[in-house]
Image: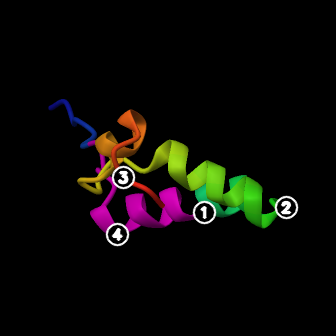
Amino acid sequence: MKTTKKKKEKSAIQELRDIRDKIGLDIQDMTFEQLKKYIDERLTLHPTAAWRKRGDVAL
């Protein structure tokens, strides 16, 4: 009889922790201005993100 190994999937919680840790490493030595630019470049879930690129929304 042949046994098969079942691949264990990552849980959603573990994936979120991994993402959080990666972001933490990316931003740990940034200044406020660098952090603001980092967030503005990567902000995609907020509805105004597309408007900011066009310049319609003043910050």
Lower sequence index among marks 1 and 4: 4
Report how far apart the C-alphas of labels 4 and 3 lie in the structure. 34 Å
Lower sequence index among marks 4 and 2: 4
Report how far apart the C-alphas of labels 4 and 2 lie in the structure. 26 Å
Q: Which residue is mark 3?
A: 57
User: Magenta residues?
Assistant: 7-21
Q: Nearer the viewer, residue 10 or 16?
A: 16
Secondary structure under tag 4 reads helix
Residue 2 x %, y %: 19, 30
Lower sequence index among marks 4 and 3: 4
Q: Which mark is residue 21?
A: 1
Q: Residue at x 69, y 59 (%)?
A: 35
Residue 50 x %, y %: 30, 40
Q: Quadrant of the N terminus?
A: top left
Q: Which mark is residue 29?
A: 2
**Mark 3 packing: few (<14 Cα in 10 Å), some, or many (20+)?**
few
31 in relation to 47, above or below: below
